Amino acid sequence: MKKALMVVGTSSFAGKTLIVAALCRIFRNAGFSVAPFKAQNMSLNSAVTEDGCEISRAQALQALAAGVEATADMNPILLKPMGKGVSQVVLFGRPWGDICAGDYYRSFVAEKGRDAVREALRRLTERFDIIVLEGAGSPAEINLRDRDIANLWAADAADANVILVADIERGGVFASIYGTLCLLEPSHQRRVKGVIINKFRGDERLLESGISEIERLTGVPVLGVLPFIEGLRLPEEDSQGLRAAGADGRADVVVLRLPRISNFTDFDPLELDGRVSLRYVTRPEELGSPDAIIIPGTKSTVDDLKWLREKGFERIRAFQGSIPIIGVCGGYQILGREIVEGGGSGSHRGLGLLDVVTRFESYDKKTVHASGTVDAERGLFQGLRGTTISGYEIHMGETRLGSGARRVFADDDAGLGAADNSYMTFGTYLHGLFDSPDFREAFINLIVKDSTSSKDCESGEAVDMTEAWDESISQVAETVKNRVDLSWFYEE
């Protein structure tokens, strides 16, 4: 059985990513080998494959749903926005170059993009029974019709049947279904085998007349209505999904919400822990009296450093030594004394909380799974000496320690991380730091001041993010299996 099925949406956030993951799980459970695929994804939330390639976190999650190892072929083109209309193009898991949107569509798509998509699809088709493709945004962007390789052009390349997903929570669901289908080319209209109405709350009987009418108007059946599913524990693909929650008496952890924040799923284990209140802040006056401060990863370290300084976030220096201050990846670089750009671009003064210097002297990017053995016994690392902390690195630049910095990991020259004299300020290139249960527990135990009041809070000690994601995928897959008619796909 060699088949392809594509999921497109009436808009962004219609639920394509999760439905693709659910379909991957359904087909896997039915005994097929299945792979996810997204020709082009724009995201700052990425993952590293076992062979050191960078792809979108969404396709890595879908590979988990399919029960297969994620590869660069599943997301051959990853666009990482850098600001001012420029994105870094990651081609087959490796940085290709920085390009503006106009040049991307005018030159890259024609010269490299289409060939990359065809090549990836060919390899996946040779290996798997079923390919489940995910579109991007809307397939009806008529201004990009001749250059859009992420949607129905990819369906043509894979000879895929198509399902259209519409988000009823946003309102105007029937108009969006009708408008999307009407704007498609006739050959693409014929590929659409059905519609899924997603995120419905309420009595489905209220939809019956509308569903009958939209089926009459378009000739396309509504395959099912999916409810809004509460309580899913899955990574956000876009930073727009981050919430600015308020502290509620639990340990108050503040994350600086950088304009170009990346890999924010690093902090999901903290958000799921009942002892922690995780807040994202954009102004210094929102800091309050936190129990810990985190500077996350960023796609543009220098630009976000300038933003922090302009906003007045240098005031976090007042917290140094009294509470944990952790910088991850770009946040590690920002905490340092200096950032030196190559090509004569000059140097930039960091926040100066760590005596480290980062140099950007090449376009090479380090993408690798990594681990380190703790060789410290104070501050954040009390009781952790000899413990292994694992994660992955995705970064440009090389960081070196000055005399005032302290090594944290054995046999490491600051590639994985460094601390100040108190070991309470810590910078690291390890994404997934809080997935390591030993470090997470030591961190939470350090910042939970009132152990009596925390007894009523649910502990996150047993949280394993992969298991949490897998459970949520299974929940959605079961819902899709029970509520969406897929019989036509098996019968064709």
Image (cartoon, grey):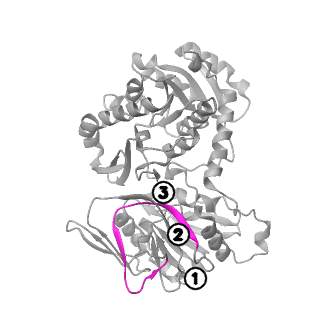
- Whether pointer 1 and pointer 2 mark residues with C-beta atoms closer than 8 Å, the reply is no
Whether residue 420 sits left or right of residue 198 in the image: it is left
The residue closer to the viewer here, 348 or 281, is 348
Q: Is residue 347 magenta?
A: no
Which residue matches tag 2?
294
Which of the two marks, 3 or 1, is nearer to us in this view? 1
Where does label 1 land, which residue?
Answer: 377
The image shows residue 31 at horizontal and vertical percentages of: 61, 30
Q: CA distance from mark 3 to mark 1?
A: 28 Å
What main secondary structure does the magenta stretch of the protein show?
Answer: strand
Residue 87 at least partly seen: no
Position of residue 231 relative to residue 405, above or below, is above
The answer to which quarter of the image holds residue 275 is bottom right
Task: Look at the picture and state if 187 lies above or below 84.
Answer: above
Residue type marked 3: Asn
Sequence-wise, which precedes: disc 2 or disc 3?
A: 3
Residue 191 visible to the viewer: yes
Q: Residue at x 51, y 72 (%)?
A: 326
Considering only order in the chain, which callout, 2 or 1, is on the residue closer to the N terminus? Answer: 2
* Residue 376 placement (x, y as % from top left): 54, 81
195 over 70 or under it: above or below = above
- Kindly identify the residue that appears in the image at 57 percent across and 34 percent down: 24
Report the mark closest to the observer, 1 or 2. 1
Q: Which residues are magenta?
A: 387-408
Of the numbered discs 3 and 1, the one sitting upstream in the chain is: 3
Q: Quadrant of the C terminus?
A: top right
| Amino acid tagged 2 | Ile
Query: Which percent across, then down, holds residue 93?
Result: 37, 48
Q: Which residue is mark 3?
A: 263
Q: Please identify, in this view, whether the residue under mark 2 or under mark 3 is nearer the observer.
A: 3
Element under disc 3: loop
